[in-house]
């Protein structure tokens, strides 16, 4: 193992500042005994081969082999004590961290530990405690790297499809209204299956409720960007193709969802120039879908509530009389990043309200929850926000676990694709995950950030044609809140690459008879 790491370190020598001459020094002062064991000829420690770590602190117990052996035994014993839960789940909750790559999870766990003033690396996100873990291949049938539309279709309907397509199988052509209208192409979602089994259904997201991932719960759209009628070509509208917001409110299964929460008000509201209207919608058909949602519930004689900020939501939550239906649209566009938000509920709060609403159902429920803005922060190379959104997502998972019983509730936590955020080598334990590497410089003798993006919006090459020194940037050093000065290739357009997504399942069991096969 040691030699493997050294070999990798040497292979990296052209990228990072290495000191190969030290290797010779080391060899010169070392000889090998007959068993091949290294015997150092002087009692003093020799110079180490390369990077010397400089941790601020190492917990004393971690320095002893005994601690690690005990930890392994404790873990193994706990694993062996686990019994397989063969119950049939009454309730299902699916969490998706949009764009939450494995590297994001590592960085977010470190970040969350550092927030709590621990070192960070040893911290564990809530879903990392779950008993089962797996990896999924996330390509679309026509794309190497998927988008959130084809992946939502895949994990919510069980059908892999084409890039940019929601709730339709691969027989469609993206953007073709004809293939969207052809019902044999429709891929019904787990939300619909759950309704057919008499379960209640809800969705919660931090993006627009009409965005690709939540749309997978209710829409059949050959183009993910047809979020409101203004986006749909006129000829498609005249053929009867409906935008995603319309499908949410007016069609099944969206019409029957007991809980809908997120952003995206503008996709449901008409574009009217009335100075009294505080939200200007995007719809050109003049329809106010929040009003049609209300009319639909009145016709069903169902109690219902439409809320637009955190206060209104908390009033509903704290009332003795929860409505049967709840529509919460907290922003015109996506909800704000948690760190920048005012007057909007957190993902954790929305999940708590949704579970309170849905757990009244005698037959059970299915809830879809998306931490949707991890992806957006990554698109803009805003690592701090991406990590914070991931921590918020983990808090929401924790809340769901607290409020439910594993005997009757299956919680699955996953991602839909990854991003190009990477975590570079040689930071010491406890080094600020959002900072620069403390022990090494690049080949150009400039510091480099632990986190970097293989592509992104800002150039990492300065006007002099050389790599910028981020430690000289006020924005980077002082305003970590929204800096984005990680290493990037110059001139690349913002573009996302995604790799495989990990799945954490709290229990392996059937959700309903129609669980994804
Ligand atoms: C595929 O979609 C087209 C419409 O675009 C339809 O005419 C055809 O019947 C579909 N094929 C199948 C197998 O459903
Ligand atoms: C509303 O319509 C006007 C006129 O077509 C347009 O300029 C404006 O951008 C629209 N507003 C929104 C929010 O779509
Ligand atoms: C709604 O309630 C009214 C009055 O209680 C009743 O007359 C009507 O039949 C109900 N409609 C439905 C669809 O349940």
Image (tube, grey):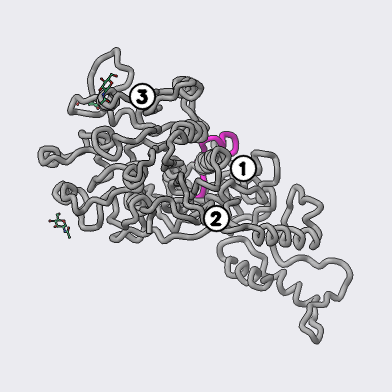
Look at the image and say whether residue 29 sits in the magenta stretch: no
What type of secondary structure mainly makes up the magenta span?
Answer: loop
Q: Give the range drawn in magenta.
A: 477-487
Crowding near the residue tagged with mark 1, few <14, some 14–19, many ≥20 C-alpha atoms within 10 Å = many
Asked if the residue at tag 1 contacts the one at tag 3, i.e. Cβ–Cβ closer than 8 Å, the answer is no
Q: In the image, which is nearer the foreground, mark 2 or mark 3?
A: 2
Q: Which mark is residue 112?
A: 1
Instruction: State the residue position of label 3.
Output: 304
Query: Which residue occupies 43% across, 23% down?
Result: 309
Q: Give SS at disc 1.
A: helix
Query: Which residue occupies 28% across, 60% down?
Result: 142
Query: Foreground residue, 75 or 361?
Result: 361
Query: Foreground residue, 260 or 476?
Result: 260
Where is residue 427? Give x, y as percent. Answer: 65, 53
From the viewer's perspective, is residue 247 above or below residue 286? below
Quarter-of-image position of residue 268: top left
In space, the residues marked 1 and 2 are separated at their CA atoms by 31 Å
Q: Residue 85 carries which label?
A: 2
Query: Which residue occupies 45% across, 24% down?
Result: 313
Q: Give SS at disc 2.
A: loop
Mark sitting earlier along the chain (2/3): 2
Query: Which residue occupies 48% across, 28% down?
Result: 345
Query: Foreground residue, 315 or 141?
Result: 315
In space, the residues marked 2 and 3 are separated at their CA atoms by 36 Å
Query: Foreground residue, 78 or 87?
Result: 87
Mark sitting earlier along the chain (1/2): 2
Where is residue 461? Give x, y as percent. Answer: 47, 49
In space, the residues marked 3 and 1 are separated at their CA atoms by 37 Å
């Amino acid at each position: 193992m040691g030699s493997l790491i050294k070999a990798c370190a040497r292979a990296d020598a052209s990228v990072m500042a290495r000191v190969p001459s030290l290797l010779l020094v080391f060899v010169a002062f070392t000889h090998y005994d007959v068993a091949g064991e290294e015997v150092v000829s002087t009692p003093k420690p020799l110079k180490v081969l390369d990077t010397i770590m400089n941790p601020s602190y190492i917990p004393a117990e971690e320095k002893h082999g005994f601690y690690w052996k005990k930890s392994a035994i404790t873990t193994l014993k706990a694993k062996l004590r686990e019994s397989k839960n063969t119950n049939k789940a009454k309730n299902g909750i699916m969490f998706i961290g949009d764009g939450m790559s494995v590297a994001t999870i590592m960085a977010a766990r470190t970040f969350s530990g550092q927030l709590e003033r621990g070192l960070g690396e040893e911290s564990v996100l809530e879903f990392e405690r779950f008993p089962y873990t797996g990896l999924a291949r996330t390509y679309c049938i026509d794309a190497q790297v998927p988008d959130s539309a084809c992946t939502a279709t895949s994990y919510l309907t069980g059908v892999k499809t084409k890039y940019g397509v929601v709730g339709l199988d691969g027989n469609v052509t993206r953007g073709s209204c004809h293939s969207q209208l052809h019902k044999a192409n429709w891929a019904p979602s787990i939300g619909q299956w759950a309704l057919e089994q008499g379960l209640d259904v809800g969705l919660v997201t931090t993006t627009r409720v009409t965005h690709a991932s939540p749309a997978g719960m209710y829409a059949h759209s050959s183009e993910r960007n047809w979020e409101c009628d203004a986006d749909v070509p006129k000829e498609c509208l005249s053929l009867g193709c409906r935008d995603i917001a319309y499908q949410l409110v007016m069609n099944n299964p969206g019409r029957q969802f007991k809980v809908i929460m997120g952003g995206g008000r503008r996709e449901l509201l008409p574009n009217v120039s009335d100075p009294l209207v505080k939200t200007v919608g995007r719809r050109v058909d003049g329809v106010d879908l929040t009003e049609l949602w209300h009319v639909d519930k009145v016709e069903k004689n169902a109690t219902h509530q439409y809320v637009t900020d955190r206060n209104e939501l908390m009033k509903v939550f704290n009332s003795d009389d929860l409505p049967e239906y709840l529509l919460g649209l907290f922003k015109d566009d996506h909800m704000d990043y948690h760190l920048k938000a005012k007057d909007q509920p957190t993902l954790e709060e929305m999940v708590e309200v949704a579970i309170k609403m849905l757990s009244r159902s005698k037959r059970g429920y299915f809830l879809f929850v998306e931490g949707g803005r991890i992806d957006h922060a990554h698109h803009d190379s805003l690592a701090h926000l991406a990590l914070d959104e991931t921590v918020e997502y983990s808090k929401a998972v924790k809340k769901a676990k607290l409020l439910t019983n594993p005997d009757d509730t299956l919680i699955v936590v996953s991602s839909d694709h990854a991003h190009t955020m990477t975590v570079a080598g040689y930071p010491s334990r406890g080094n600020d995950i959002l900072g620069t590497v403390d022990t090494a410089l690049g080949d150009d003798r400039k510091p480099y950030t632990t986190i970097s993006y293989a592509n992104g919006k800002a150039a990492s090459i300065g006007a002099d044609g050389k790599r910028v020194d981020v430690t000289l940037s006020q924005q980077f050093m002082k305003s970590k809140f929204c800096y984005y000065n990680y290493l990037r290739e110059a001139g690349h357009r913002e573009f996302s690459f995604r790799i495989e997504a990990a799945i954490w399942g709290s229990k392996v069991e059937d959700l309903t008879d129609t669980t994804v096969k």
